[in-house]
Amino acid sequence: MKAYATKLIDLTENNAEKIARQWAKDVRTNEKTSSYHGADDERILLQATEFYHHFREMFVHDAPYRHAEKYFEHYAEERYREGIPLHEAVYALILMRRHIWLYAEFQAIFITAVEHRQAVESLSRTILMFDYAMYIITRKYRELMKLEWFETPNT
Amino acid sequence: MKAYATKLIDFIETKSEEMARQWAADVRKNPRTPSYHVMTEEKVIPQAIFFYTHFRQMFFTKNPYDTAKGFFARYAEERFRDKIPLQEALYALILMRRHLWLYAEFRTAYETSVDLHQMAEGLNRTILMFDYAMYQITEKYQELIARDVDRKLGAIKTLRMEDPASGNKGVFKAGLMGVMLLAACVLTYYYHATLGVDVIFTHLFYIPIILAAIWWRRAGIIVAVFLGLLILASHALFLRDIPYTSDIIRGVIFVLTAFVVARMAESLKKVEDLFKTLTT
């Protein structure tokens, strides 16, 4: 797995700040992330650079779910503390993933058939990680918002 | 991309029931979707069939966000009604996508660079649709949860009389409290001075005590302190021969009751504010 993903991971890690800046610009103007519009630039940049620097670890970890759980629970807690609504926290993370691909596409790192295969596999692996992220973040927000107070016992 | 996508979608549509069955078997035993474990196959399978049969429409639309919105709002409403927690509703949808890809990959060979490029494009398009789905379902769930919380707190909101659209409630509440405290003074005088007893009339004092704690929270405890002092002062004036024990206990219970209700009112206010911030 590591071989095919190396290219994308290296690109993300080496250009974490650049990708993070593009993401920050997007999230500060995107209509689906309105809570970020007035946010301090440095503070939101930190969210993305931290994520991009953790990208390798999440990608190559032997137990990806457990590793993702720790990272994304922390992400959820921080966004919750900042008063970011759940749907915006989720969408900001989706944009983080999109900006990796936008950057990779812009750099044209996947050209040959082998590279296309690598691209598909990297994409699948990234999506798996984000599937976990969506589950973990929504579960954590539910816990923090004490939604169980308002739900019937079988949930 | 369109040729590949058309092939894929035709394939999905013809195999929708088969894929839905596989998805249902997964979701009914997956540890991340425990709410589905108790649901019957007949209840679960149609969810996936509906999704797979509408896939073409969402995939080829010129405005995927708006098309997805109607579909996923319905998905969110139905899962919310089924009492499925948000994270499970999302994960069940993620599994629908995974089963779609598992099924398609298992039966298709991608060899050339063009095949792989088209596959990556198809994958990207599906992911875009699912990105919208995650956002829209989460947003819809929060809207439904906020509405539900609002409904469940309806009675306490009525008691709080805080509807900003209906004029100055502050003056009305202070006036009403003034009348109730005046009535408490008259009642205390009548029972202590005229009848010479210290019996159950003080139970009526819990009405202003509880209302004050709900309206003004901790500041409302002053009403309980006032009523406690009132019965003790009246006792000292008119019931010198009767021991103070009962009225001292009453006074303490007044303050304790006010404190507990005020704390609960504060917590409810916090929950409401939190929901306002996190769901809008």
Image (tube, rainbow, N blue to C red):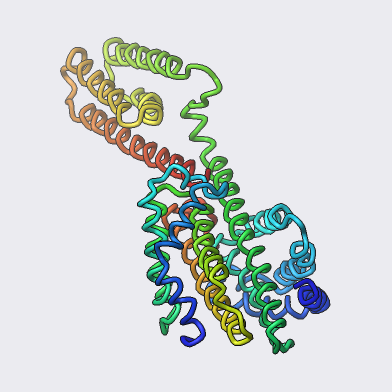
Residue A17 image position (x, y, % from top left): 40, 62
Instruction: Determine the image quadrant of residue B263.
Output: top left
Residue at 61% over, 51% down: B140
> Can residue B241 be seen here?
yes
Residue at 54% over, 75% down: A128
Residue B258 image position (x, y, % from top left): 32, 32
Q: Nearer the viewer, residue B219 or A3?
A: A3
Q: Nearer the viewer, residue B28 or B135?
A: B135
Q: Nearer the viewer, residue B103 or B249?
A: B103
Q: Is residue B188 left or right of residue B19?
A: left
Residue B31 image position (x, y, % from top left): 53, 76
Residue B56 image position (x, y, % from top left): 79, 67
Q: Is residue B194 above or below residue A123?
A: above
Q: Is residue B158 left or right of residue B58?
A: left
Quadrant for the C terminus of chain A, please.
bottom right
Residue at 77% over, 77% down: B4
